[in-house]
Amino acid sequence: MQSNKINAAITAVGMYVPEKVLDNHYFEKIVETNDEWIKARTGIKERRIIENGATSDLAFRAAEDLFKTTTVKPEEIDLIIVATVTPDMFFPSTACLVQSKIGADKAWGFDISAACSGFLFGLDAAARFVESGVYKKVLLIGADKMSAITDYTDRNTCILFGDGASAVLIEPADDKTTGYIDSILRIDGSGKDALNMKAGGSLNPATYETIDKKWHYIYQDGKAVFKVAVKGMADVSVEIMEKNNLKSEEIAYLVPHQANLRIIDATAERMGISKDKVMINIDRYGNTTAATIPLCLTEYYRAGKIKKGDKLILAAFGAGYTWGASYLIWSID
Ligand code: COA
């Protein structure tokens, strides 16, 4: 008997990265660091920075790129979800700003604040909305202008981040053997002291003092986060494989959040996945927070490296702490 269950699937992708490139040598001039250290400790060679514009502009360009590839029109979108930790402003949400920029006249929407796990959390929400049958076309965008909250005098963090955005369209899958299958998602607020932006919210509203203390920039205890990120991302990735009886040789790609190549390598090793089956863009874009995973998906798809039916594991770890892994079967020909 044919199941009536609706399977949600990614049916179109789009991306935008700014033109301006900051390579590692640029940072040698502004802080005490060097290209070799950055490449060896993080895997990053360069990152993109937006010169004019905000996160909604990055998101808009990614959506515009997506709409060039599908017959679906902005006015048909039911719901817009933007995953970001760098919204243009506290309110309105970036989803509202994107709605008016693309002319999605029938849509409602909201932002998700889950840092580097934002795209995974957004994907799960989008898929469940579609599976419910209530919504048919959800636009999910991972977008961050990390340069807006980066302290370019702090060598511990400034070398890590870049700006970018990527959009996916989620619709009911035509073919029920493909689409969004499963996820394991977690949060743990005890991570708040290791990775945060302290000021600007209701706890520490902006004052001269918060500015003097540089509390409007990213703070990260890199060593502490590194340890929990390696364990957290690898644990859920292995758990989702076991839960779905997936052997490593069946997985076409691991699509990891791009914070540090060493965290990615450790996760792949625990899953028994070889390096050629791990999507990477950290070398060219650094950590673009909510955008890293959909940027990987868009670039690998456009390069012809993923095909319909491929089994993918998406995995992320970020501020919160937030982390998780998702299993999907690629749906676009
Ligand atoms: N250039 C040169 N040296 C640097 C440097 C830089 N850009 N940044 C830090 N260092 C120094 C440190 O000051 C430290 O010096 P010390 O031993 O004299 O104090 C030394 O390098 C080693 O620092 P450490 O923190 O041990 O480096 P690391 O190997 O942990 O790498 C990170 C630092 C930030 C790259 C790494 O910790 C990391 O990736 N953390 C997790 C990131 C993450 O997953 N975040 C979650 C999502 S955003």
Image: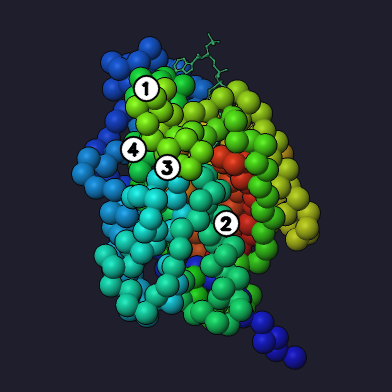
Res 126 → quadrant: bottom right
User: Does residue 56 lie above or below 318 as drawn?
Assistant: below
| Numbered disc in front, either 4 or 1 | 1
* Mark pair 1, 2: CA separation: 34 Å
Q: Which residue is mark 4?
A: 148
* Mark pair 3, 4: CA separation: 12 Å
> Of marks 2 and 3, which one's residue comes earlier in the chain?
2
User: Does residue 36 lie above or below 44 as drawn?
Assistant: above
* Mark pair 2, 3: CA separation: 16 Å
Q: Amino acid at mark 3?
A: Thr
| Numbered disc in front, either 3 or 4 | 4
| Numbered disc in front, either 1 or 3 | 1
Q: Who's the residue at 60% across and 23% down the image?
A: 223
On the image, the x and y values in percent for residue 258 come to 50, 40
Q: Amino acid at mark 1?
A: Asp
Q: Amino acid at mark 2?
A: Phe
Q: Which residue is mark 1?
A: 212
Q: Nearer the viewer, residue 176 or 187?
A: 187
